[in-house]
Image (spheres, grey):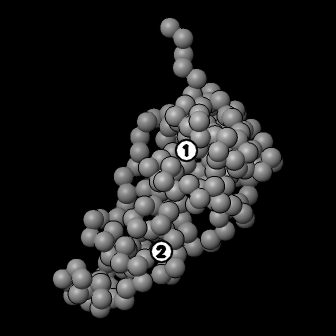
Amino acid sequence: MMKETRRIALIGLAALEAIGIRSIVRECSDFMVEAFGNFADFMPLADSYEAYVADSGTFVANLDFFMPRRQKTIVTGISVMSLKNSSGGPLIIGHDADEADIEVTVKKLLGSLQTGETVPGELSFREREVLRLIAAGRINKEIADELCISVNTVISHRKNISSKLGIKSASGLSLYAVMNGII
């Protein structure tokens, strides 16, 4: 029986980014890596790939495609220092990432593909509701009124969310909510 080729698509990456990621993947797995200059070239073949590495512009412009596949996606070029890679969203390689960070992120994606495991989200249902309302720009009192809970409970949820995600600012939490399909 012939072994099926496992494939990763690199979409919209600069040439050096593609070369570096391709090198890391070859070093530690048997996945085949193919690079595409833009999303339009990639789309006719999209179903034949198990994972995706896309630049932030491509990711944002094609959220409808990437959000259902976010646990199999790495996004490059995001330079938000307070945004931590989350278990429910895409992995992130920032502009300021060093070689070791890039290698760890790529190996994390490969590991999840090889084991077939997806890590469940860290936030509870109620915390996700609170986060959705924070991202919508609501203040604590408005969140409490909408969810029929006390302001103190909202504050507790916000502290728990910040603690779990390592994100302190409302803008960072909003970005996390968008990247993870919460809003």
The amino acid at mark 2 is Ser
Work out whether residue 20 can be spotted: no
Asked if residue 155 lies left or right of residue 51, the reply is left
Asked if residue 119 lies left or right of residue 144, the reply is right
Q: Which of marks 1 and 2 is nearer the N terminus?
A: 1
Rendering quarter of residue 101 = bottom right
Residue that numbered label 1 is attached to:
109
User: As rendered, which of 166 and 3 lies closer to the eye?
Assistant: 3
Q: Which residue extends farthest top?
A: 1
96 up-or-down from 49: above or below: below
Q: Do the residues labelled 1 and 2 touch (CB within 8 Å)?
A: no
- Which label lies toward us, 1 or 2? 2
- Figure quadrant of the C terminus: bottom left
What residue appears at the point 51 percent right and 71 percent down from the top-left corner? 175
The x and y percentages for residue 67 are 47, 54
User: As rendered, which of 13 and 94 lies closer to the eye?
Assistant: 13
Residue that numbered label 2 is attached to:
174
